Image (cartoon, rainbow, N blue to C red):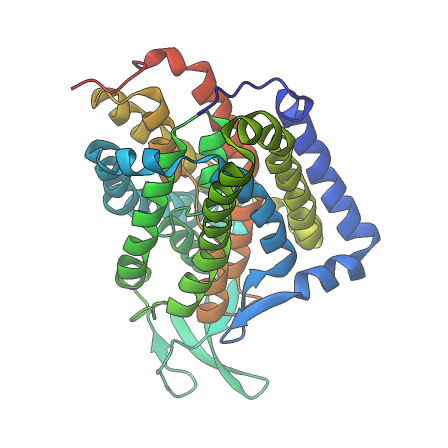
Amino acid sequence: MEERRLTNIFERYLSIWVILCILAGILLGRIAPNVARTLDAMSISVKGAPVVSLPIAVCLFFMMYPIMVKIDFTEVVRAGKSGKPVLLTLFVNWAIKPFTMYAISLFFLGFVFRGLIGAEATDLVKMPFGLDLPVGAIHGAGKVVLKEGVKMLEVPLWRSYFAGCILLGIAPCTAMVLVWGYLARGNDGLTLVMVAINSLTMLLLYGPLGGFLLGVGRLPVPWQALLLSISIYVALPLVAGYFSRRWLIQVKGVKWFEEKFLHFLTPVTITALLVTLVLLFSFKGETILKNPLTILWIAIPLFIQTNLIFWLGYWWAKLLRLSYRDAAPAAMIGASNHFEVAIATATMLFGLSSGAALATVVGVLIEVPVMLWLVHICLKTERWFSPVETE
C-alpha cells in the first residue's frame, strides 16, 4: 500500500479547515434554519427514532469509499491473524470503557457540575418499555407524572444527561474510526477487521451492558437501528470498494489504479469529512447557541473519557510491542463512539427532547475535533513504536 503523507492542502491545514467548517455549520443553522431542518428531517427512522440521516449517509459513503477501495483484502486476511490488536480493542471497548464512562460522567454531572446544572432541575422522559405505573408512583430516581395526557417519568436533569453519556460509552465506533486510522497512517486492513468484530460484539453486548449500567430496567437491544446503521455506514462502502477495486484493476491494470485512480481520490475523504462537519453543526447549531454552558458541562467528562481511553489503549499497545500501524487504530477505535446508534437509542428510550438525547448530541460535537487532535498525537509519536510487531 502506498505511503501516505500529509502533503495536500486539505490534510496539511486540516485543523484550520475543521474550525472554519464548524463555524460555517453553526452560521448556516442560524441564518438558514429551515434549510438545516429540512436536511436533518431527511432520515430513515426505526420506531420513530431517526437512525440514518440521508445527507450524512451520502457524505459518509464518500468519506469511506476511498479508504475501502485502497484496501488490498489479502492484507485484511493477514491482519485477521494478528490476535493481539483485536483482543486489546475488545478488552478496552467492553471491559474498561463503559465503566470509566460511568464513573467519570457520574463524578462530573452528579457532583462537580450538579449545582451548575441545577440540583433541583428535572427532565421528562419516556416511561420504560412495558412499564405501566400509576401517576405519583416512584420508579428508580423518577416519579410518574401526567404530561398532556401522557404518562412520563420526571427525573433529575443531571441523571438524564448521565444516561446519554452511558449510551455513548457502550457504543464503540464502527465507521468513522476508518477515517481516523487512515489519517494516522494506520493499518487499514486491521482497522476493518476490528470494525467487523466490534460490530458483531455490539449486537451482543449493547443491550445487556446498557441495561445494567443504566439501572432503569431492561434496555431493549436496538437491533434494527444497529443493523441499519452498520449496513449503510460500513457495509455499503465496503462492498462498493471491494468490487470496484477488482473491476478497475482487471480492466485498467494495477499501475493505472494506483497512479491515476487513487491519486484522484486523495482529497475525497477529507472533503466529505468537512462537508459532514458543516451539516452536523448546521443541524445542531441552534442547540449549541441555546445551551452553551450545558453543552460545556456535558462535554468535559466526554473529553476526559475520550483521552483516557485513547492513552490506555495506546500505552497497552506499546507494552504489547505492537507496530505503530496496528497501535494507532487499536487505540482510536475505543476512544471514538458510534454516536448514530447512541442518539437513536436515547431517542427511542427517553424521547427526542430529553437530556439524554442532548448528551448524545454533544458526543457528536466533540467527536471530530478531539479525534483529529488524537490523530495528530499519533503521527507525532510514531517513533515510539517498532516498524513491525515484535514477539
Image quarter of residue 321: top left
Q: Give me the residue at 67% from left, 66% from top.
A: 41
Establish if 69 lies above or below 350: above
> Could you tell me which quadrant the C terminus lies in?
top left
Locate residue 141, reporting x and y percent: 36, 67
* Front residue of 23 and 117: 23
* Front residue of 2 and 15: 2
Give the residue furthest to the top: 383
Locate residue 369, reporting x and y percent: 57, 34
* Residue 51 as seen in the image, left or right of residue 94: right
Q: Give me the residue at 26% from left, 38% from top.
A: 80
* Residue 136 as seen in the image, left or right of residue 116: left
Locate residue 344, reporting x and y percent: 49, 63
Locate residue 332, reporting x and y percent: 40, 34
Image quarter of residue 140: bottom left
Q: Give me the residue at 47% from left, 27% from top.
A: 374
- Residue 120 can be seen, yes or no: no
Give the residue furthest to the left: 391
Give the residue furthest to the front: 251
* Residue 210 as seen in the image, left or right of residue 33: left
> Could you tell me which quadrant the N terminus lies in?
top left
* Count of number-bearing discs: 0
* Front residue of 169 and 234: 234
- Residue 19 can be seen, yes or no: yes
Q: Give me the residue at 43% from left, 41% from top.
A: 336
